[in-house]
Image (cartoon, grey):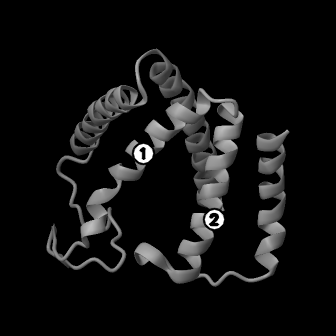
Amino acid sequence: MLKQVSNKLMALLAGGLLALMIEINSELAFVNSPIQASWIAHGVGAFVAMCLVLIVAFAFQGHKRNGLVKTKGIKTKGTKTTGLPYWLYLGGLPGALTVVLAGITVNSDIGLSGTLSSALIGQIIFGIISDHFGLFGSQKKPFVAADLLKVLPVLAGSFIIIFT
């Protein structure tokens, strides 16, 4: 139960950080350009990620790796991973495009809330499709009519934010 609550809180924090990132990057994109803002954002992000890797590596120094990382259908030999699908290396591509596109749209007439609402709609639609077909190794969860009761209020609220 506690793990479910903490996961939901972390997801909420991630959403807030995403909104903060989009706002900061859009200001930078307005002053410079969306491409330059993306380069700066990802350069800073790479630096922070490297620092986190070093901190975690230092914290777990001497601990065995077994049991720390779950793999979803990826073949492992000892501590080496083999047979990785090519698309696992493309995670930064959507992030880079998100930064560029958000930098453009936040500075348009829809603003930050419209950009975030549009992004939310895109995430919901992609999530439904991904769950339904089990894309990228995710567990299949067929879309049923009852799911509309969960999705429609979010979509309606997003449309109100964007179009009013």
> So how many labels did they put on this image?
2
Residue closest to the eye, 80 or 142: 142
How far separated are the C-alphas under marks 2 and 1?
18 Å
**Tag 1's secondary structure?**
helix
Res 90 visible? yes
User: Residue at the top extreme?
Assistant: 31
Q: Position of residue 146 (x, y in %)?
A: 81, 79
- The residue that label 2 is drawn on is 125
Can you give x and y, in whole percent of width and height, for residue 13 in the image?
59, 40
Question: Is there any visible trace of residue 140 in the rendered image?
Answer: no
Name the residue at 25% across, 37% down: 50
Amino acid type, label 2? Ile
**Helix, strand or loop under label 2:** helix
- Give the residue at x 35% y 69%: 70
The amino acid at mark 1 is Leu
Q: In the rendered image, which residue does mark 1 sit on?
A: 97
Circle 2 Cα neighbour tier, 10 Å, few/some/many (<14 / 14–19 / ≥20): some
Q: Quadrant of the N terminus?
A: bottom right
- Percent position (x, y) of residue 99? 45, 38
Q: Position of residue 35 (x, y in %)?
A: 36, 31
Q: Residue at x 84, y 70 (%)?
A: 149
